[in-house]
Image (cartoon, rainbow, N blue to C red):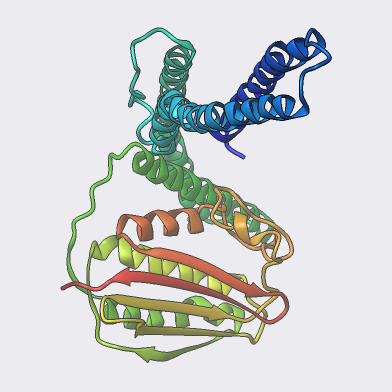
Amino acid sequence: MTIRTRLTLWYVGIIFSSLLVMVGLCYHEFVIEPRQHARRHKELESEQEEAFEALGMLLWCGVPAALLAIGGSWWLMRQAMLPVVAMTEAAEQVNERNLGGQLPRSGNGDELDRLTEVFNAMTVRLDGAFHRIREFTLHASHELKTPLTVLHGEMETALQEPGLSEEQRERYHSQLDEVRRLSKIVDGLTLLTKADAGLISLKLEPVQLDELVRDAFADAQILAKPFKVQVSLSACETITIPGDRHRLRQLLLNLTDNAAKYNEPGGTMEIDLRRSSTTTAQLGITNSGKGIPADLLPHVFDRFFRGDPSHDSTVEGCGLGLSIAKWIVTAHKGTIEIASRPSEFTRVVVTFPIAS
């Protein structure tokens, strides 16, 4: 029940109680008192006439007063709650991208105006906190790139030195893999932080999505070979969408790489591209494997999410691939969804608007 309805009911209850008290007092004053002091010779007919007069007074005065009280209270509560409704609608539009915006204030200095002022001050503080976090992530990523690049180069140089034992080579290879993994994490964080700050602009142009899917199919066969996963392209309709070719290739690479890694030896991967309607294209990538439990599905796009059993700790990755994929899809005004049935399949469905 809304606050407006509760206040109206309370107000109506108070009005009715007041009316009952008023009617009781009037009845006592105009009926009971005269009756007690009346002469014995007063006839019964006159008493009935007085009772009818009191009832008529109640009907002709009480009912219109009650209707007026209900209508007036509803209008009064509606006017009183209008600022709350306006503030609620404005607050619903607030997100991490527009925290700098301010909710409209009435300026009359009442409780709601004060609440709006406090809320605006809170969003300003939140905007500053988000800004500092983004700046810290960008600066930290930038500072980490140089030492990681130096470490990468030194390890590759060390691997070229003659006379290294097999154990030393394995150690260098292991360290080099960790450095590459750290570099991927740094690159992913930099990309997502810039995307959150609106610092990345996509170069939108007509792109033949079917050509990119065929290229991704060829790449997926190479990615899936170490895992002995069979890759198939079940459908690939000719479709043109407005998009950034580089980011779309990155999206397809992330999705096919995940479908290969989080699979089972000798499993399958199926890619399909179809028109789901006259205005949308649907890309689907299905893979076998352990699948993702239902309670973990809502978190698969969270950054650094690597949950068991769908995300085995032995599988290479940094937990940023699906976050980047979601940003790319959203930037292209599309949608991405994941459905999974444990021990059977996992299917990623991406929908894009088709170029007019």
The percent coordinates of residue 166 (x first, y second) are 66, 61
The percent coordinates of residue 19 (x first, y second) are 63, 21
Q: Residue at x 27, y 76 (%)?
A: 209
Q: Residue at x 40, y 7 (%)?
A: 109
The percent coordinates of residue 58 (x first, y second) are 61, 28
Q: Quadrant of the C terminus?
A: bottom left
Q: Is residue 294 left or right of residue 58?
A: right
Q: Residue at x 41, y 64 (%)?
A: 335
Height in image: 154 above or below 250? above
Q: Is residue 308 left or right of residue 222?
A: right
**Is residue 155 visible to us here?**
no
Q: Quadrant of the N terminus?
A: top right
Q: Quadrant of residue 17?
A: top right
Height in image: 276 above or below 145? below
Q: Please tell me which residue lies in front, 198 or 218.
A: 198
The percent coordinates of residue 24 (x first, y second) are 72, 19
Height in image: 267 above or below 172? below
Q: Quadrant of residue 345?
A: bottom right
